[in-house]
Amino acid sequence: MILLLEEIHTQAIMKHSNSVFPIETCGVPTGIAKTQIRIIKRIEAAQNRTHSSRSYTIAPEESHRILTQSEERGESLVGFYHSHPS
């Protein structure tokens, strides 16, 4: 599988990670999911509802909102991201 993302996406993940450190950060990249290529169009930062430095949980209602909005834009779930702050 090939994952395509721009520097702005990497910066968004880093900014989110730094803003919640030492809590584990998490979020949802959305975009285009073709056969073996994933093209990230947007990074959706999520709140770690466990507020832990070792694990993360995204609230179901937040996941639903992110995925519904991405579908409305014609995008798909590309995956999830999370940090390992410790």
Image (cartoon, rainbow, N blue to C red):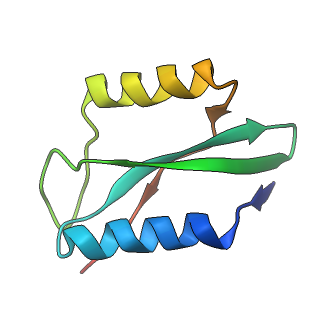
Residue 57 can be seen, yes or no: yes
**What residue is at 24 percent from the left and 32 percent from the top?**
59
**Residue extending farthest bottom:** 86
Locate residue 71 relative to residue 81 in the image: left or right: right
Locate residue 9 relative to residue 20 in the image: left or right: right
Locate residue 52 relative to residue 46 in the image: left or right: left
**Residue extending farthest right:** 35
Q: Nearer the viewer, residue 65 or 57?
A: 65
**What residue is at 75 percent from the left and 38 percent from the top?**
32
* Quadrant occupied by the N terminus: bottom right
**Which of the 4 quarters of the picture holds residue 4?**
bottom right
Could you say where residue 53 lies in the image, as x and y percent from the top left? 18, 68
Could you say where residue 72 lies in the image, as x and y percent from the top left? 59, 18
Could you say where residue 34 lies in the image, as x and y percent from the top left? 84, 37
**What residue is at 21 percent from the left and 74 percent from the top?**
21
Residue 84 can be seen, yes or no: no
Locate residue 8 relative to residue 51 in the image: left or right: right
Could you say where residue 6 lies in the image, as x and y percent from the top left? 70, 66
**What residue is at 67 percent from the left and 30 percent from the top?**
75
**Which of the 4 quarters of the picture holds residue 58?**
top left
Above or below residue 81? Residue 64 is: above
Q: How many marks?
A: 0
**Which of the 4 quarters of the picture holds residue 63?**
top left
* Quadrant occupied by the C terminus: bottom left
